[in-house]
Amino acid sequence: MSQRTIRRALREVCYQNRVIKKAIRLRVPNRRNRQAWCRGQLHFPVIGYWDRVIFSDESIVEIGANKRVYVWRKAREERKPECMNTPPRKKFGIMVWGCISYKGMGTLAFVKGNLNAHGYQDILEKNMWPVAAKYFLPNDFTFQDDHRSRIRILRIFSFLKFNEFVRLKKNHQKKS
């Protein structure tokens, strides 16, 4: 039997060759904690609360070839575990940091090497303060970061306290 014959037979029973969806590595307790945190934030209004929050995060932008993985599945089966692929652990790329608020975006900062406390403080001074100064009155905004352990270093806490940052309440979860 040829590959073409097999593909034709699969299509006749409603299977399609689709790009596999990436699965997010998230443990069940962390998923529950995220959902509980989100439900706890639902009552806050956009105007008067969320419009004064500066959200920040860092991410790795992958560089290189697009390595798509395909799977034969039926329509609406894209979220079945057997039709999903967990992303590889090793990634090659560049880390970027950015922030955004209801009122506008900040600049994208490229992170060289590992993001330690000194580097994070430098990013906040050069990239977050201009956003805060442009869109908010002094001490009239809430800063949201991902509360990672590297950020919880005493140096960052003292920097945030010295600059009178108000931080969004932590979503209690461990990073996977």
Image (cartoon, rainbow, N blue to C red):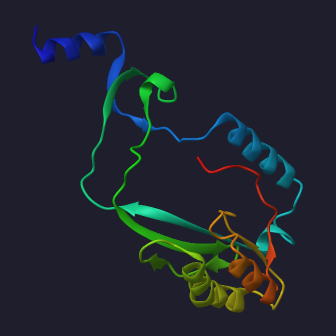
Q: Position of residue 128 (x, y in %)?
A: 63, 83
Q: Position of residue 150 (x, y in %)?
A: 62, 68
The image quarter containing residue 21 is top left
Residue 90 or residue 95, whichever sits in front: 90
- On the rendered structure, is 19 left or right of 26? left
Q: Position of residue 141 (x, y in %)?
A: 80, 80
Residue 154 or residue 123, whichever sits in front: 154
With respect to residue 118, does 24 lie above or below? above
The residue that appears at 84% across and 55% down in the rendered structure is: 41
The residue that appears at 52% across and 73% down in the rendered structure is: 115
Task: Specify the quadrant that holds the N terminus.
Answer: top left
The residue that appears at 50% across and 78% down in the rendered structure is: 108
- On the rendered structure, is 50 left or right of 103? right
Q: Position of residue 7 (x, y in %)?
A: 22, 17
Residue 150 or residue 135, whichever sits in front: 150
Q: Is residue 76 visible?
A: no
With respect to residue 54, does 73 lie above or below? above
With respect to residue 165, does 65 lie above or below? above
Q: Residue furthest left?
A: 2
The image quarter containing residue 14 is top left
The residue that appears at 63% across and 90% down in the rendered structure is: 130
Q: How many marks?
A: 0
